[in-house]
Amino acid sequence: MENNYTKKIISTDSEDQTNELLTEFRNGNVAAFSKLYNLHVNLLYNYGYRLTTDAELLKDCIQDVFIKIYNKQNELEGVQNFKSYLLISLKNKLCDESRKRIHLSDVAIEELDIVSSDNVEHNYIAAEKEKNNHDFIRRMLDKLSPRQRKAIELYYIEEQKYEEICVSMQMNYQSVRNLIHRGMLKLRTCAV
C-alpha cells in the first residue's frame, strides 16, 4: 500500500513542479522552459519510441514539439494536463512526419511496417484510470478512524487473517471483526 502512496506523492510533486514551471515560463522565465524540457524529454522519448523505431525522426519531432511550445507560450494557458498535451502533440507530430515521408518515399504503402499506437494509448488510459481509483480509495480510507483503516488495510490489502490482525493490533478476535465490519459499513455509506 505504501508504494501506491509513494507513487501518488511523486506524481503529485511532478505535476505541481510542472505547473509552477509552466507559470514561470508564461511569465518569461526561459530557465523554466529548460527545466520543463529536462523534466519531460525522457517520457516523450519512451512514449515516441513505441510509435516509431526511427530514433532520429523521434528526436527531431520532440525538438519540434518543444519549439512550438516555446513559440506559442501564450496559448498554454488553457492546457489542463501538460503531460497529456505533450504526448498528444508528439503523437500528432510523428503522424504528420510519417505522412510526409510516405508521400516522398518510393516504398509502396503495403510494404511499410507501421507501429501501432493503440497499445500506448490504451496503457495511458489504463494508467489514468488506475490513478483515479487510487485517489478514490485513498480519500475513502481517510474517512475511517486510524484503527478501522489499519484493520481494513491488514485484512483486505495485506490479506492477513483475523488471528494475525488480532496479534498485530493487540485486540481480541470479535473486536477485530467488529472493527472491520463497522469500517466497511462506513465506507459503503461514504461511497454512495
Image (spheres, rainbow, N blue to C red):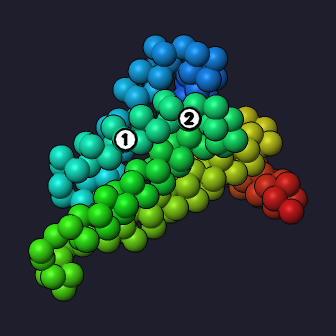
155 left or right of 77 in image = left
Q: Is residue 77 visible?
A: yes
In this image, 21 relative to 177: left or right? left
Mark 2–mark 1 Cα distance, whole angstroms, equals 12 Å
- Residue 172 position by quadrant: top right
Disc 1 residue crowd, few under 14, some 14–19, many 20+, Cα 10 Å: some
Measuring 64% from the left and 17% from the top, which residue is drawn there? 27
How far across and how far down the image is residue 4, in percent? 51, 43
Q: Which residue is mark 1?
A: 64
Amino acid type at mark 1 = Asp
The picture places residue 70, in percent across and down from the top left corner, at 49, 30
Tell me the quarter of the picture where residue 28 sits: top right
Q: Residue at x 54, y 14 (%)?
A: 29
- Callout 2 touching callout 1 (CB < 8 Å): no
Task: Please give the name of the residue rendered at 70% of the width and 41% of the height, measured from the top-left corner.
Answer: 78
Q: Is residue 150 left or right of residue 46?
A: right
| Mark 2 / mark 1, whichever is N-terminal | 1
Q: Position of residue 102 (x, y in %)?
A: 24, 70
Return the x and y of residue 63 as percentages of the image width and height.
33, 37
* Nearer-the-camera pick, 78 or 147: 78
Numbered label tally: 2
- The three-letter amino acid code for the residue at tag 2 is Lys
- Quick check: 80 above or below 39? below
Secondary structure of residue under mark 2: loop
Mark 1 falls on what kind of element? helix
Residue 116, image quadrant = bottom left
Q: Please give the label number shown on residue 72.
A: 2
Query: Residue 90's mark?
Result: none
Residue drawn at (25%, 71%), measured in percent from left and top? 103
